[in-house]
Amino acid sequence: MACSMKIPFVNAYAQLPDACFAKLPPTPVRAPRLIRFNYPLAQELGIDSSAASDQDIADIFAGNRVPDGADPLAMAYCGHQFGQLNPQLGDGRALLLGDVIDQQGRQRDIQLKGSGRTPFSRGGDGRSPLGPALREYILCEAMYALGVPTTRALAVVSSGEQVVREQPEPGAVFTRVAASHIRVGTLQLFALRQDEQALRALADHVLERHYPHLDRTADDRYVQLFAAICRRQAELIAQWLLLGFIHGVMNTDNMTLSGETIDYGPCAFMDAFKAGQVFSSIDQRGRYAYQNQPAIGQWNLARLAEAMLSLFPGDEDAAIQQATTILKDYNNIHSQAWEQGMVRKLGFSSVVAGDVQRIAGL
């Protein structure tokens, strides 16, 4: 059947080394029904849905019909989860349909979440309940409206099937849009495997895609890349704190190299300030509490530095020194971003000595 929706895929990620992914089609669902479609975002992505019915859209974004030009794949990565390295994670219930160039010339991923088992499922069913899909739609679009770098929500489709968690729940497929889905854990995987070819190819892809202002011919281009990633994360986490946002699962596989908020699991906004606030039922020790998020961001970036050291110029000692200097500067960047944000929130035009301490005490 001809696809009634035109999506201008370019599929740059699929051109990376085969070790970066596993290609496979989504697993169809029983009775897809469109719950929500983000028409303004679709237009921004250059998607022509003018001839598509609700059922056409549901079929495509449930994975029952693969659109022309798509090259679906599950991405490989590992990660530190609550401080412990899990050497093999990957997309266990998600497939990247492909990437497109949007109306502003930016490369964007379109990913189905809840699209069935993959080689990285590790015993999971590859599916997603409807409730969390709707919650993620609301949260990422709210963060976008608040001006926070974030993944976006394109569609929610109910599957007509039940998924079993603590009890049976209606199933769904969520379509996520991101500048990319490349994570700290993506580079960690290939450093762990000592796969220099894939590691360098990924770093070059990230540099070209997310940091085109950097000099790709410079000897220290990967040092510059690491510094740019650290800056974006420091500024992003400052924005979280200014909104009272608690991510909940700041594992290294949940930190993007693009600097976007991703994976809205046990996250929430505080109603009343509590520095040690935690919303995740599994975070018993408060590792990812509100006040710990800046330090956890720096810890995650130290793991990224370890993964990238072989790409830095000079010997190992020189590489470690360069990474250490950048990581030390992270705190200054974060503090400055937080202070500037608080000044704006309080309506000040400028700050003088002592104001920062008074603001922090509010």
Image (spheres, grey):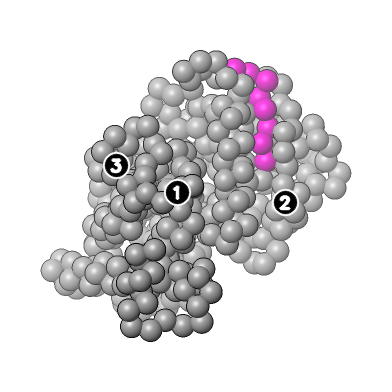
Using the numbered discs, state the Cα–Cα distance from disc 3 to disc 2 in whole angstroms: 38 Å
**In the displayed structure image, the side of residue 158 where residue 326 appears, left or right:** left
The residue tagged with tag 3: helix, strand or loop? loop
Asked if residue 352 lies left or right of residue 346, the reply is: left
Q: Is residue 257 visible?
A: no
Location of residue 64 by image quarter: top right
| Badge 3 amino acid | Gly
Q: Residues within 10 Å of mark 2 (few under 14, many from 20)?
A: some
In space, the residues marked 1 and 3 are separated at their CA atoms by: 17 Å
Q: State the residue position of label 1.
A: 272
Who's the residue at 25% across and 58% down the image?
A: 302
Residues in magenta, as a range: 155-162
Mark nearest the camera among 3 and 2 is 3
Q: Residue at x 40, y 43 (%)?
A: 248
Task: Point out which mark residue 42 bears.
Answer: 2
Q: Is residue 353 visible?
A: yes
Do the residues under discs 3 and 2 have CB atoms within 8 angstroms?
no
User: Gap between marks 2 and 1, in whole Å?
Assistant: 36 Å
Secondary structure beneath label 2: helix
| Quadrant of the frame with the N terminus | top right
Residue 7 picture location, percent across and down: 72, 49
Which mark is nearer the camera, 2 or 1? 1
Instruction: Pinpoint residue 49: horizontal percent, then vertical percent.
Output: 80, 47
The amino acid sitting under disc 2 is Ala
Which quarter of the image is occupied by the C terminus? bottom left
Percent of width and height locating residue 246: 42, 48
Q: In this view of the protein, which residue sits in the foreground, 174 or 333?
A: 333
Viewed as shown, does residue 104 lie left or right of 121?
right
